[in-house]
Image: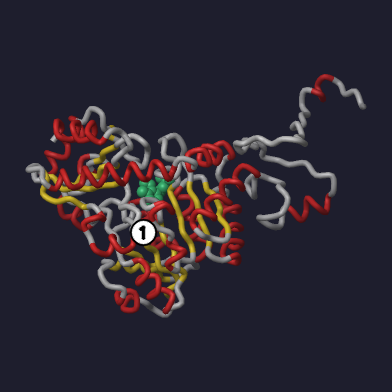
Amino acid sequence: MTTWKPATTAVHVSAPSLSNSRPISVPIYQASNFAFDDPDALAEALERPDGAFAYSRYANPTTRALENKLAELEGGVAAVATASGMGAINSVLLASLRAGDHVIAQQCLYGGTFATFKDLAERFGIEVTYVPGDDPAEVAAAVRPNTRLLYLETIANPLTTVIDLPAFLAAGKEKGLLTVVDNTFATPLLCRPIDHGADVVLHSATKFLGGHSDVTAGALVFADEQRYRQVWQHTMELGACIDPFAAWLLIRGIQTLPLRMRQHCANAAVIASRLAAHPAVAEVHWPGNHAVAQRLLPHGFGGVVSFDLAGGREAGHTLGKSVRLIKLAGSLGGVESTIMHPASTSHRQLDADALRAAGIGEGTVRLSVGIEDVEDIWADLTQAL
Ligand SMILES: Cc1ncc(COP(=O)(O)O)c(C=O)c1O
């Protein structure tokens, strides 16, 4: 055995190799770089997503364990984990669109996605036609010779709108469009868009997949191998890769996803029905109230309930200040209940008309119902209302 000088010994470390046992949990391979014995093997590993591990922006063993789990859960052939939901959205859009292309998207969408589409239009001339989502014929009516992509959300943020996803996907396929579905609010436990014909499914894994408000991450899952390789290449070039520790947190979070989703759905159903009978509430937005969602989501309607306060902007502002157990917070999907009043927080610069154009009322509140005892959630809501 060579004896190295202390400055050399301090630098080099080898992971223990295990022969007769293996860890039950996936280890965190907090490594950016992997050493090879053979230059040809290194060259080959740098060419493709699924060979040996060479560099963690391309692929990493912990990340790969997460990606395999996500692909299995969503019924896809492969997945790419990303640094955030926005990383996933921008990777798939930039990998799939060229300057001058046209996109059809549903009107009710996450605000960050709107911002990305606005940016793509201004800088690359990629125009977007927004359709209400009431009738799949809207797709054929909006299609142009340069339309490339149809972008949808299973349960849309913030109003929890559910469109007839299989019919919209079929309409998109009929026109030869690439179909992309943001499945963040539903998770694969409630809906698997690939089963309904989607080409690409994406997530803000920061929300329900992670589930503990402690990790920022995203994911893309693919129905076919070719699209996977193309988008992987682009994600790798963008540098939108996930960190191994974040991937590990997600693997850990996903282990309890079925239990958490069951409780989110059960609690949200109770809160939605009680809110509907509360005098301070003008309208409740919850997928369970609609026939389309009842068909699409047989296992539950998710953990998000939005509602319009009769007292408008002032009432929403007061509610945000008055909750004690429920946290006033911008994100959602954690085990703890969180609430957000867009008109006094994220959208406070908008007047009533601009809010309406964004599909939000002055008194609209988005509640992410956690997995606490539902009576405690309700008691906090009623004292605040
Ligand atoms: C439906 C939806 N998609 C995407 C995103 C963006 O995800 P991230 O914040 O992880 O980048 C969000 C974030 O709120 C979201 O709600």
The x, y position of residue 242, in whole percent, is 55, 44
The reply to whether residue 36 is visible in this rendering is: yes
Q: Is residue 13 above or below residue 80?
A: above
Q: In which quarter of the image is the C terminus?
A: top left
Residue drawn at x 29%, y 47% is: 304
Q: In this view, does 183 lie above or below 4?
A: below
The x, y position of residue 325, in whole percent, is 25, 29
Most extreme residue toward the right is 1
> Between residues 46 and 69, which one lies in front from this camera angle?
69
Position of 60 with respect to 242 (left or right) is right
Identify the image quadrant of residue 141. bottom left
The reply to whether residue 348 is visible in this rendering is: no
The x, y position of residue 124, in whole percent, is 45, 64
Residue count near mark 1 (Cα–Cα under 10 Å), binned few <14, some 14–19, many ≥20: many
Residue drawn at x 18%, y 32% is: 379
Amino acid type of the residue tagged 1 in the rendering: Glu
Position of 143 with respect to 377 (left or right) is right
Q: In this view, does 121 lie above or below 360?
A: below
Identify the image quadrant of residue 209. top left
Assess mark 1: CB under 8 A from ligand 1? yes
The x, y position of residue 211, in whole percent, is 41, 39
> Between residues 67 and 4, which one lies in front from this camera angle?
67
**Residue that label 1 marks:** 153
Position of 229 with respect to 146 (left or right) is right
